[in-house]
Every structure is written in structure tokens, then in C-alpha cells.
Amino acid sequence: MSITGSATAVVPTTPEAVFRTLTKVEGLPSWNDKMTRVVEEPESLRPGAEWVVEFHVLGRTWRSRSVVDELDPARGRFAYRSRTDDGNPSEATWTWGVVADPAGTRVTVGWSLRPGTFWRRVLLGRIRARQLARNEVPASLAALAAASVLAPTTG
């Protein structure tokens, strides 16, 4: 079972600035207000690299481990898998696309939630998907836009 969604926003800056902000692991909590902190960072961001972040949603705090599947700045593609760091078999795949747009940069994020336990399949996965689509992803895209506009143009 997979629950999918996507969202797109246009950011008034360069694709390079958006991609740099998007892939700066230590800066993730600055544009995702449900992410409270980065617990572990990779030595370098490349396919296979892992990082751990902490989330706080609906009164619950948990850690999520992510693994890079694709990192292609030239094509503006970034994809990774994430799962809670507690052994639960549920997993999510996140794909990001960053392309030039007449107004700056078009950013598209897609997600595929794969709930691996009974209650996540029957109830919690659907609730989480609605939260992402209605509130969290649009808020994160707006905050990513603001952070990208303020990002240095080199580096």
C-alpha cells in the first residue's frame, strides 16, 4: 500500500540557490517547522548518505532516518527514503525537483508513504497524508522559498 501526494511552488530566486538550501542537511529545521533538530549529519551528501532528524507532530516526538537515493544538482533532482528510527517498517520516499521558471524556480515535492503496520495502514497513514498535503508541505515550501531567497548565491 502506498499513499502519494505532491505539491509545487514557484520561488523568486535561482534553481541553484533553491537546490543548495534544499540539500543543506543542517538547515532542514529552518524551513520545516515540524522538524525540531538535526541529530546526525552525513560527512558528505551523496547517494547512500544518511542523516537523522527529530520531529514533533501532534504532541509526539520521534526520530527519522533518511538515506539519499538520488542527488543530481545538474538536473535539480533530490530523492531520499525516510523511516522512524525505532524499527517500525513504515517508510516514505521524498522526491524533489527544481527547475527554472520565468518567475524564478519551480519546486515540486512528491511523497509516497508506505505504512508497514496495521494501524498505520488503516488509519495513521491517511491522517499523516492529509496533514502533509493540507498544512505541512505548503508551509515548508513557503519557508523553503524564504530561506532560498536569503541563501548566498555561491557555495
Image (spheres, grey):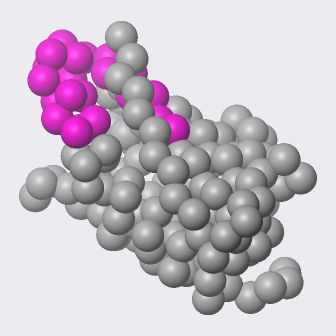
Name the residue located 75 percent from the left edge and 39 percent from the top edge: 70
Q: Position of residue 32 (x, y in %)?
A: 40, 66
For residue 69, above or below residue 42: above
Q: Nearer the viewer, residue 73 or 34?
A: 73
**Residue 113 picture location, percent across and down:** 39, 28
Spot occupied by residue 74 in the image (x, y as percentages of width and height): 89, 53
Query: Which of these two is toward me, 140 or 14?
Result: 14
- Give the image quarter of residue 105: bottom right
Could one spot residue 96 in this view of the protein? yes
Relative depth, front residue between 91 and 97: 97
Is residue 57 part of the magenta span, yes or no? no
Farthest residue in the front direction? 102
Instruction: Assign the C terminus to one quadrant of the image.
Output: bottom right
Q: Quadrant of the N terminus?
A: top left
Kindly identify the residue that appears in the image at 20 percent across and 56 percent down: 57
Q: Is residue 46 left or right of residue 4?
A: right
Q: Please state the extent of the stretch shown in magenta in the rendering.
A: 110-130
153 to 10, vertically: above or below: below
Note whether 78 is above or below 53 in the view shown: above
The spot of residue 46 in percent (x, y) is: 79, 49
Query: What residue lies at 43% left-to-right and 70% top-to-bottom?
Result: 142
